């Protein structure tokens, strides 16, 4: 159930977005990010498994992210 983001969640989400934006090779056009406490929820579609792994790797190194719920699907996949 969605909740109103706390200040800490907003700050962490901003750090994650900045970290991901620093990698110009990442295609984030169909990816949404949200925070649930200290868990980052990643949804959307990516071109391949390496993109999904890279997003998770970068986000996992951001201060404030303790867990990642990676719900990404591959484009063109079933």
Image (tube, rainbow, N blue to C red):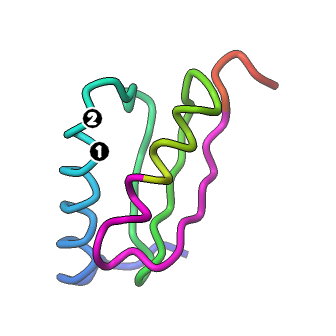
Which residue is rendered at x = 17% and y = 72% of the image? 11
Query: At x 20% / y 62%, what residue is drawn?
Result: 15
Q: Is residue 59 magenta?
A: yes
Relative to 28, residue 33 above or below: below
Query: Residue 31: where, in percent of width, then height?
Result: 44, 38
What residue range appears in magenta?
58-73
Q: With respect to residue 77, does 4 lie above or below?
A: below
Helix, strand or loop for disc 2: loop
Is 61 located above or below residue 38 in the figure? above
Image side of residue 27 versus residue 9, left or right: right
Q: Residue 17, image x and y in percent? A: 25, 51
The answer to whether the residues at label 2 and label 1 have Cβ atoms under 8 Å apart is: yes
In depth, the one of 45 and 50 nearer the eye is 50
Q: What is the C-alpha distance between the residues marked 2 and 1?
A: 6 Å
Q: Quadrant of residue 21?
A: top left
On the image, the x and y values in percent for residue 9 come to 28, 77
Q: Image quarter for residue 4?
A: bottom left
Most foreground residue, 13 or 64: 64
Q: Is residue 38 placed above or below 77 in the rendered structure?
A: below
> Circle 1 sits on which residue?
20
Q: Residue at coordinates 54% horizontally, 39% vertically from top-left? A: 44
Residue 23, disc: 2
Q: Nearer the viewer, residue 9 or 26?
A: 26
């Amino acid at each position: 159930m969605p909740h109103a983001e706390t200040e800490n969640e907003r700050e962490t989400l901003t750090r994650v977005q900045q970290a991901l934006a620093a990698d110009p090779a990442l295609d984030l056009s169909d990816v949404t990010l949200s925070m649930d406490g200290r868990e980052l929820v990643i949804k959307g579609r990516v071109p391949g498994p390496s993109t999904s792994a890279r997003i998770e790797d970068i986000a996992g190194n951001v201060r404030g992210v303790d867990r990642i719920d990676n719900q990404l699907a591959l484009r063109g996949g079933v």
